[in-house]
Amino acid sequence: MNLRQAAPYALAGVLALALARPGSAACSAGSGQKTAALIELYTSEGCSSCPPAEQTLARLQASARGGSEWYALALHVNYWDYLGWQDPYAQPIFSERHHWLVQANRQRVVYTPHFFVSGAEISGQEAALRAELARVNRNPAGAHIQLDLTEAADGVQQVHASARAAGNGEPLALYVALAENHLVSRVARGENGGATLSHEHVVRSWMGPFPLFDGSAQMQQDLSDADNRRLAHGELVAFVENQQTGQVLQALGLASCKP
């Protein structure tokens, strides 16, 4: 499915403040010296060609080769909802981001399923995805990311993230997404009407952009009750992105450490 390019992606910048971190650290992760890749799959339950693409992503995960490092986000778009099925995981912000990434790649057509690896448009063929992941992993990291998850006395989990990058004057920003796994939907109408779909890496919460000022950014945010439950079988994925080109300089993931 395809959609002609519409308005460019535009989000208001959020000033990230360095704040005190209450509670004790539940778990933490820091990025390494090599670049971890970020896969973004733009998908929809209203798109008949999207389930096979999600299966490709699942196969990549199941057969990850030693030494490869990448994190995946499945962003459900809402611009196919008018065809008869409203995707329960779609958010307008993902459609906006999809349009922006297409524009950043100097393309004109928006379609699903649509893969990007570290901001670059890529074929959905499994071999092409593996080759691009390997290529990204060979590059030295362009940023450092730290992710921490703390729990307050009342049980509320709080996300803390920080990023550092040289940037050379380029506009950089930190993002954090909460992705949920093992989701199942029964689609009643539309192109996938009657099908039961399984989903992995579904983005449920989107935090950012947090611009890097003087080469660094920090953020903290409480998780809602719903996101606390989602993180039990999901993960946080943070990445630093060039706000002009869409290039992802580094990515990092952190699963919940609660038993």
Image (spheres, rainbow, N blue to C red):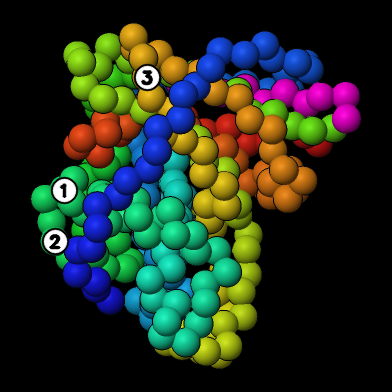
Q: Is residue 255 magenta?
A: no
Decide: few, some or many residues near mark 2? Use Cα within 10 Å; few <14, some 14-19, many ≥20. some
Across and down, in percent, residue 39 comes to 36, 46
Q: Which residue does the image show at 60% across and 25% down from the upper left?
A: 220
Left or right, 133 with reference to 4: right
Write down the residue under mark 1.
Answer: 105
Inter-mark Cα distance, 2 to 1? 9 Å
Residue 31, numbered label: none
Residue at the right extreme, as displayed: 154
| Quadrant (top left, top right, bottom left, bottom right) of the C terminus | top right
Magenta segment: 144-154
Amino acid type indicated by mark 1: Asn
Query: Which numbered disc flags the more N-terminal residue, 1 or 3?
Result: 1
Across and down, in percent, residue 11 comes to 38, 43
Left or right, 61 with reference to 171: right
Write down the residue under mark 2.
Answer: 108
Residue 212, numbered label: 3
Across and down, in percent, residue 193 comes to 51, 89
Amino acid type indicated by mark 2: Arg
CB atoms of marks 1 and 3 within 8 Å: no
Local SS, label 1: loop
Local SS, label 2: loop
227 over 192 or under it: above or below: above
Q: Which residue does the image show at 25% across and 39% down from the upper left?
A: 246
